[in-house]
Image (cartoon, rainbow, N blue to C red):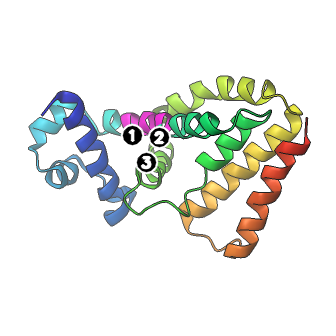
Amino acid sequence: MSASDTKSRLLEAAGRVVLSRGAAGLTLDAVAEEAGLSKGGLLYHYGSKEALLAAMVQHLVDVTEDRISAHRAADDDPGSWTRGYLQACVVEELAENDPAGRLAIALLAAGASAPELIASIRERQGEWRRRLADDGIDPVTAMIVRLAADGLWMSDLFGLPVLSSAERRAVLERLDSLTRAAR
């Protein structure tokens, strides 16, 4: 197995640990056991719990940007980046084994325990703001849609029953239509 495969395996295992045991249960021993590796094997790839959390956060950034790119491959109209971000934040309908939910929980755990671990998210904000501003639609509308998407994402992660399924679909449709009307 390549080092890249082992790292991915460890990130997935860490996500499963967070889901099953909570953020407090994310220990190197638990991740190593879940991945079927020794703790030394884990430490070879990620030298500390902080390094593992930082890698999980970076992977979440990568997954988000991959989802935006996938959306844009089918949508090249003005506002497509904003709509891609909106779709990337929709985790309610993801399969249980999808990495986005587990990695997002790790992001919250990382940010709560050590804010410096979310540096990769912080670093991407300038680029994401630029993409929103240059998306071919009103930049304020793009930001409103982005912030609403973030709020829906957080509600989904915490399992908060803020909206019924029908209300949620209506909100997503309205946000999508805002991006199409804001040219």
Q: Amino acid at mark 1?
A: Met
Q: Amino acid at mark 2?
A: Leu
Mark 2 — residue? Answer: 60
Question: In the rendered view, would you say 158 is above or below 52?
Answer: below
Q: Is residue 180 left or right of residue 13?
A: right
Considering the whole magenta stretch, tell me its main secondary structure: helix
Q: Are marks 3 and 2 in contact (CB under 8 Å)?
A: yes
Q: Position of residue 36 (x, y in %)?
A: 11, 50
Stretch in magenta: 54-62
> How far is disc 2 from disc 1 in space, using C-alphas?
6 Å
Q: Is residue 140 left or right of residue 176?
A: right
Q: Amino acid at mark 3?
A: Leu
Closest to the observer, 97 or 13: 97
- Say if residue 46 shows up in the picture: no
Determine whether the residue tagged by mark 1 lies in a helix, strand or loop.
helix
Residue 56 - label: 1
Closest to the observer, 102 or 77: 77
Determine whether the residue tagged by mark 3 lies in a helix, strand or loop.
helix
Q: Quadrant of residue 67?
A: top right
For the point 78% across and 62% down, which residue is it? 171
For the point 76% across and 31% down, which residue is it? 132
Q: Are marks 1 and 3 in contact (CB under 8 Å)?
A: yes
Q: Position of residue 87 (x, y in %)?
A: 63, 49
